[in-house]
Image: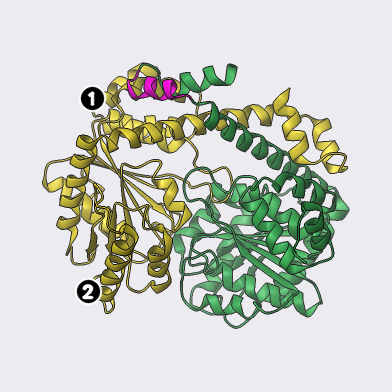
Chain colours: A yellow, B green
Amino acid sequence: MPVKTGSDLSERVRKGDIAAAARAMSVVVDERPEADELSKAFFPYSGRTQKIGLCGPPGAGKSSLAGRLIGFFRKQGLKVGMLAVDPSSPISGGAFLGDRLRIQEHATDSGVFIRSLASRGMIGGVSHTIFGAIHVLEAAGFDKIIVETVGTGQDEVEIGRVADSVVSVTTPQLGDEIQAMKAGVMEIGDFFVVNKADIPGADKAISDLKGALALGRGHAPKPWEPPVLGASAASGEGVAELGRALERHWNFLRQSGEGKRRLREQHREELSLYISRRAYRDAMRRVSDKNLDDLLEHRIDPASLGARILRA
Amino acid sequence: MPVKTGSDLSERVRKGDIAAAARAMSVVVDERPEADELSKAFFPYSGRTQKIGLCGPPGAGKSSLAGRLIGFFRKQGLKVGMLAVDPSSPISGGAFLGDRLRIQEHATDSGVFIRSLASRGMIGGVSHTIFGAIHVLEAAGFDKIIVETVGTGQDEVEIGRVADSVVSVTTPQLGDEIQAMKAGVMEIGDFFVVNKADIPGADKAISDLKGALALGRGHAPKPWEPPVLGASAASGEGVAELGRALERHWNFLRQSGEGKRRLREQHREELSLYISRRAYRDAMRRVSDKNLDDLLEHRIDPASLGARILRA
């Protein structure tokens, strides 16, 4: 029987029906009219699942590493959901290399759900729909959620507002990226992975990163010391170590109160993005022909006009 | 003497001072307090410069092509500004290949201004700051503005809200992308460029795209027939043809009213993004500790709470 109502659909998602989860996710991500209703139904199940952010520059091998991590979790009998918001990801459409295969080996596994989300390139952003997509996976009973996102520097701050555990991935080939990591973004990652650790320069990259971390830390012991790990998505080397470190981090988050603090910030972000998206859509409707004429004729500028519309 | 006030700075930008333009752009892009004041000063000079959007998947060679286009315009004595919001771009930090060099040959040319804008990865987006960055270049007297953005499918719609002339770039190596182009996104581009036209499969890709365009067009003649061009950023082949086609398109836009229609939609987008960004920042301030407690305890969901805060 076809699904008729949002509540039918949400019940099927709750029972772990993969087809229903896929459908619910499309509703949420495309912001169809039933999206809010579904999100309300799913929200009570949120906050219990570890959300793992994989970030790093294009070419760092995030997708391959994600494929390996999925394999690691599956061996433990865990269900894994994955969202790719990386335009250079083989999942999201940047058709690169053989990475695609590493992911596709999980394509027929009903304990794995993989979906790409358009990053909407330059403007607008994925906005709050990333949270909606996560809530679908949470409600459907996935045990781990991986979010793959491109990003260096400032972008990594953003994944920190979505994920509980942030894995910053680089490779020895990307010397500039390693410099950038060393220079300032160390505070973002909970894990630093030097991928492709079987190629020359990996050991030096790892020891450089460890040195920078030690320097940044100073003498004060931190409740969580971000490990620097070598890994090879190609051979699988180091993946189990990363998987176990992720488990340790999840325990740390739950026991220390840091997990709740992060969840709180995630809720703040989700709420603010929801409000801003609603405001954007309202604004699109409220912008009049006269407003646009005024702009075209340079009778007013967007900032002044925007402020005026917001006051109205 | 150091620059003291926004109005000093905007005057220097207006005189074409590159250092001042760089500084003004940082103010606008980082949304510093003086950003609105600067944007107001620059807005009267907007809308006269052709904004060229270069979009396509990672690996299509957009940056190299942009470098070649800059060279083409420079030979005509035109000043060129370029903004890269593509995380896989060598300018934006995806340190790939030798593309970097193709751009860097212009690094010391005072008639060229190149700047990368963080795409802010997954959430939030560059938002309206892309428009602010464009207004700086317009006010500083650049004759052509190139915006490089990653994107396939839906993303290309977004570049269409920023640029006047959209160049959709692909290569024969990216077979899936060519299929996607053929399947549905043909209406977005004003130009389709098959880059790396010196490698096998290019001729077939070009004729496939031409066929799909002819099919999509049907019998009704269109005021602008998007050309399908072969090009090689490596050898420079086809770049002059693209440059001349861009000039034809700019004349078409100005003479047909289509240019004004697009500018109107750009203003609509800029205004809506400005409003939404302001609403987001206001929302971030208005979200109370109690709101977050309520979410953590699942006493309410983000959509219901967001709607309530917006009504208040």
In magenta segment, residue A205: no
Q: Main secondary structure of the magenta part?
A: helix
On whether disc 1 and disc 2 are found on a single subunit, the reply is: yes
At 73% across and 34% down in the image, what residue appears?
Answer: A306
Residue B293 within the magenta-colored segment of the rendering: yes
Mark number for residue A198?
2
Identify the residue shown where x is 64% and y is 77%. B107
Q: Residue furthest left?
A: A76
Residue pictured at 37% horizontal, 31% vertical: A264
Q: Can residue B165 be seen in the rendering of this structure?
A: no
Mark 1 element type: loop
Image: magenta residue range: B288-298
| Residue A184 figure quarter | bottom left
Query: Relative to A123, is B247 on the left or the right?
Result: right
- Residue A128 rendering spot, x and y as whole percentages: 47, 35
Q: Is residue B87 left or right of residue A240?
A: right
**Rounded to the nearest whole Å, what is the CA distance between mark 1 and mark 2?**
43 Å
Chain letter of mark 2 equals A
Q: Residues within 10 Å of mark 2 (few under 14, many from 20)?
A: some
Identified at 53% across, 64% down, the residue is: B92
